Image (spheres, rainbow, N blue to C red):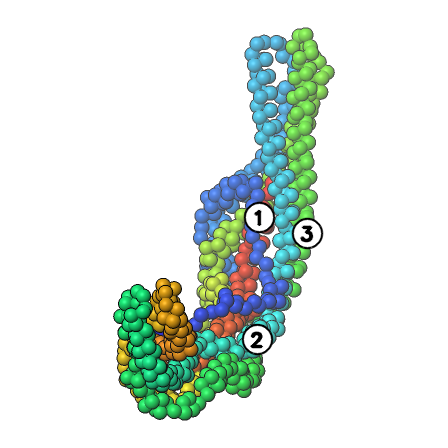
């Protein structure tokens, strides 16, 4: 039963292998997909993006912006700016006043304050000199104390407001100074970095092209293990089917050898048993007659009980009647003519050598693929050779150099003006602090003096000193407040106009629309021409394209259009590589499992008639004993009767007969029984094998032939599958590299985004770091 189970399992394994060809399996990666890593050395040359620095004064800045929106509600004055830029003499004052009406009102208020404060100061001095503005002792009344307390509270509140204001003024002034210097320095830095970015485009493109070495090394490394991987895959996927067929063939060869052996035993043993029976028959007949005569002798006491047993002493099984197997032996004469063991060993060795055979057969194509990679590197070099930017970025580079050189004098002037502004602001804020100190000293001494005198209407020197401190503060306020308001208005006018005229329209991109409108700018300020932008484009479209990550070649005016995606199509670089792999064929599955002489041996074995022998006759005959009566049993009966005899002659004869029976059993019958046992083993084996012999041999021959036919086909399928998997894997390396090239050229090496970043930086420098603090600086 165990043997039948193994045969069934093996048959199912072979059937599964034949019904599920190995070549239909999918690609199974042996590990995680390799992601190529590229080092970006060009990343050092970037235009750093500037951002507005958050400040605790941001709520104040927001309040001022809302005030500016109320003061200047007019949109961008396109007509006025066009006239000012193209024909400054045609600009009418009324147009400027109309646009700057809000600032004119502010200027009128500032002028009124500037005139009113000195006049009010002189009037106060004149009144004071006439002793009509305080200075006289008043009679103490209850209302005088309340009046003094109210004046003290109002002066304290006013001093607190002045203190908060001057603190904000100091902080704002210092912030303007702190942001002005790096802001002014960022202008030439941004222009210089942008120019370096354009100048380094050729080197950056060449660097990107040189990085093809990364996928090339990876592919060469993969090529080194391709042949053995293919061979091992073929061996792994086909070994179940092949080993099952070889094992089945080995079993049939063993059946042939064992069957022949048992047939020879069957024939020889049957003949030996028939001959032994012929020799035993007269001796047994003679022995039976003598024993029967002895037991029938009247002198033999109690011998009647054994007489019946002695009379049945005759031969049993007759192996001369069993079927002859000579015909089968004659049909199998000379088998096996082939050495099955050597044949199976050779087939197994040939199959196991497939990995080494794959290495040998694929050596040339792998060498060709390495050479093809060198040709691909030359094709990749064409990306750098055909890149059109070096000749078209020179106008932009010249314009940037000009802008950098021309901006330096203006930046120095702005820096000098800022230095003077800071000095003036610091001095005026210090004077305000001095006024505040006079107010505090005056209030402190006055309050102290009043608390020390007995009669509140009496004169007291400390109170007088406090009054003088207050008068000094008033005098300083009249003398210098108009200067402070002039400084505030000047910075407010400059910063506010920059905010409302430039920054606000920069944020909503109205300024780009103004620049893009033909005729608004003089020819000398034609940015599209100076930067060599596309003629069908404008600054707004260029800014949007650059902001969204366009390449320089997409915004510059070229002699011919350049499509980077067309140059980065994978088939352009991998077609020959794929073709060489696709055209490769190799015969790796030519394994001979069974030669013709071995097949003839198995066919002869199946036709030998082994299944036609009637093994039941053998089994029926083997059920019969060789002698009908047991010789040992009869001998023991005679020995027992010997002891019961009174007649010594009869007793001696009984003993002699018992010994003769034992001798016959031991010398003849026992050897025949051994032959019968040996015959039984052969009959049992042959009877189990014979019914299934033809079916097994037929299946083995069919399986072997099918495996021999399928091995080359499925090996070729697996070869194509493995090469296809390898090709797709290597194409992913090409795709990764080309995608990286496109991304790096667009976003880094030849990106237009630095231009958009430079424009954004200009807005941050002008609006957030210069104009915004100015329009709030005291």
Give me the disc on residue 53: 1
Coordinates of residue 297 in the picture (x, y in percent): 30, 72
The Cα atoms of the two marked residues, 1 and 2, are separated by: 51 Å
Give me the disc on residue 39: none
At mark 3, the secondary structure is helix
Count neighbours of disc 1 (C-alpha within 10 A) and say few if under 14, some if 14 to 19, many if 20 or more: few
Give the labeled residue for mark 3.
416
Q: Which image quadrant is residue 589 in?
A: bottom left
**Mark sitting earlier along the chain (1/3):** 1
Residue 556 horizontal side relative to residue 684, left or right:
right
All told, the count of numbered labels is: 3
Residue at point 57% right, 36% down? 113
Count neighbours of disc 2 (C-alpha within 10 A) and say few if under 14, some if 14 to 19, many if 20 or more: few
Q: Nearer the viewer, residue 271 or 359?
A: 271
In front of the other: label 3 or label 2? 2
Residue at point 64% right, 32% down? 477
Give me the disc on residue 221: 2
Coordinates of residue 559 in the picture (x, y in percent): 50, 79
The Cα atoms of the two marked residues, 3 and 2, are separated by: 64 Å
At mark 1, the secondary structure is loop
Residue at point 68% right, 31% down? 434
In front of the other: label 1 or label 2? 2
Residue 148 horizontal side relative to residue 659, left or right:
right
Q: Which image quadrant is residue 191 in?
A: bottom right
**Mark sitting earlier along the chain (3/2):** 2
Coordinates of residue 617 in the picture (x, y in percent): 27, 79
Q: Nearer the viewer, residue 231 or 117?
A: 231
């Amino acid at each position: 039963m165990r043997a039948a189970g193994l045969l069934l399992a093996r048959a199912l394994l072979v059937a599964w292998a034949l019904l599920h060809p190995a070549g239909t399996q999918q690609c199974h990666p042996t590990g995680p997909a390799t992601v190529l890593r590229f080092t970006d050395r060009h990343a050092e040359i970037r235009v750093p993006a500037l951002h507005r620095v958050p400040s605790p004064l941001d709520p104040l800045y927001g309040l001022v912006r809302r005030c500016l929106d109320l003061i200047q509600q007019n949109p961008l004055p396109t007509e006025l700016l066009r006239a000012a830029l193209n024909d400054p003499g045609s600009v009418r004052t009324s147009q400027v006043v109309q646009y700057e009406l809000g600032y004119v009102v502010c200027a009128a208020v500032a002028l009124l304050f500037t005139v009113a404060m000195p006049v009010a100061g002189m009037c106060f001095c004149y009144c004071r000199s006439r002793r009509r503005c305080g200075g006289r002792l008043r009679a103490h009344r209850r209302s005088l104390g309340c009046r003094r307390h109210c004046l003290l509270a109002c002066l304290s509140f006013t001093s607190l407001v002045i203190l908060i204001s001057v603190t904000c003024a100091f902080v704002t002034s210092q912030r303007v100074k702190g942001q002005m210097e790096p802001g002014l320095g960022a202008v030439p830095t941004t222009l210089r970095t942008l120019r370096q970015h354009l100048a380094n485009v050729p080197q950056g493109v060449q660097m990107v092209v040189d990085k093809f070495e990364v996928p090339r090394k990876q592919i060469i490394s993969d090529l080194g293990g391709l042949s053995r991987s293919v061979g091992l895959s073929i061996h792994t996927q086909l070994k179940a089917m092949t080993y099952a067929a070889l094992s089945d063939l080995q079993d049939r060869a063993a059946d042939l050898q064992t069957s022949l052996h048992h047939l020879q035993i069957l024939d020889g043993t049957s003949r030996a048993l028939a001959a032994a029976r012929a020799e035993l028959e007269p001796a047994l007949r003679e022995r039976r007659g003598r024993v029967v005569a002895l037991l029938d002798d009247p002198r033999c006491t109690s011998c009647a009980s054994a007489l019946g047993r002695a009379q049945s002493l005759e031969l049993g099984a007759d192996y001369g009647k069993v079927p002859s197997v000579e015909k089968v032996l004659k049909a199998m004469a000379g088998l096996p003519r082939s050495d099955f063991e050597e044949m199976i060993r050779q087939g197994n060795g040939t199959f196991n050598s497939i990995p080494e055979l794959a290495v040998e057969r694929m050596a040339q194509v792998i060498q060709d693929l390495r050479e093809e990679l060198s040709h691909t590197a030359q094709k990749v070099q064409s990306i750098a050779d055909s890149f059109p930017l070096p000749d078209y970025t020179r106008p932009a580079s010249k314009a940037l150099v000009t802008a950098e050189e021309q901006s330096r004098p203006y930046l120095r002037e702005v820096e000098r003006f800022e230095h003077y502004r800071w000095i003036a602001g610091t001095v005026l804020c210090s004077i305000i602090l001095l006024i505040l100190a006079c107010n505090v000293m005056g209030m402190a001494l006055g309050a102290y003096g009043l608390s020390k005198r007995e009669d509140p209407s009496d004169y007291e020197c400390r109170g007088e000193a406090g009054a003088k401190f207050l008068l000094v503060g008033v005098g300083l306020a009249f003398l210098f407040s108009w200067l402070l308001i002039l400084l505030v208005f000047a910075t407010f006018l400059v910063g506010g106009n920059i905010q409302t005229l430039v920054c606000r329209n920069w944020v909503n991109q109205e300024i780009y629309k103004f620049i893009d409108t033909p005729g608004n700018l003089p020819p000398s300020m034609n940015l599209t021409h100076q930067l060599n932008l596309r003629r069908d484009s404008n600054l707004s479209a260029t800014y949007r394209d650059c902001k969204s990550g366009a390449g320089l070649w997409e915004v510059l005016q070229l002699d011919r259009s350049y499509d980077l995606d067309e140059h980065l199509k994978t088939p352009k670089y991998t077609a020959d590589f794929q073709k060489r792999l696709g055209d490769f064929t190799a015969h790796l599955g030519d394994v001979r499992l069974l030669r013709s002489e071995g097949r003839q041996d198995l066919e002869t074995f199946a036709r030998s008639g082994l299944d036609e022998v009637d093994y039941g006759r053998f089994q029926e005959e083997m059920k019969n004993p060789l002698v009908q009566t047991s010789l040992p049993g009869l001998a023991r009966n005679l020995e027992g009767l010997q002891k019961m005899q009174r007649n010594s002659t009869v007793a001696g004869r009984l003993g002699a007969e018992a010994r003769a029976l034992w001798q016959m059993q031991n010398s003849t019958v026992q050897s025949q029984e051994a032959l019968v046992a040996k015959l039984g083993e052969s009959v049992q084996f042959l009877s189990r094998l014979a019914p299934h012999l033809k079916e097994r041999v037929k299946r083995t021959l069919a399986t072997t032939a099918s495996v021999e036919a399928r091995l080359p086909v499925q090996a070729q399928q697996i070869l194509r599958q493995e090469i296809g998997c390898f090709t797709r894997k290597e194409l992913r390396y090409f795709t990764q590299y080309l995608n990286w090239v496109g991304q790096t050229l667009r976003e880094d090496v030849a990106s237009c985004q630095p231009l958009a970043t430079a424009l954004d930086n200009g807005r941050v420098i002008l609006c957030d770091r210069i104009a915004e603090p100015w329009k709030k600086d005291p």
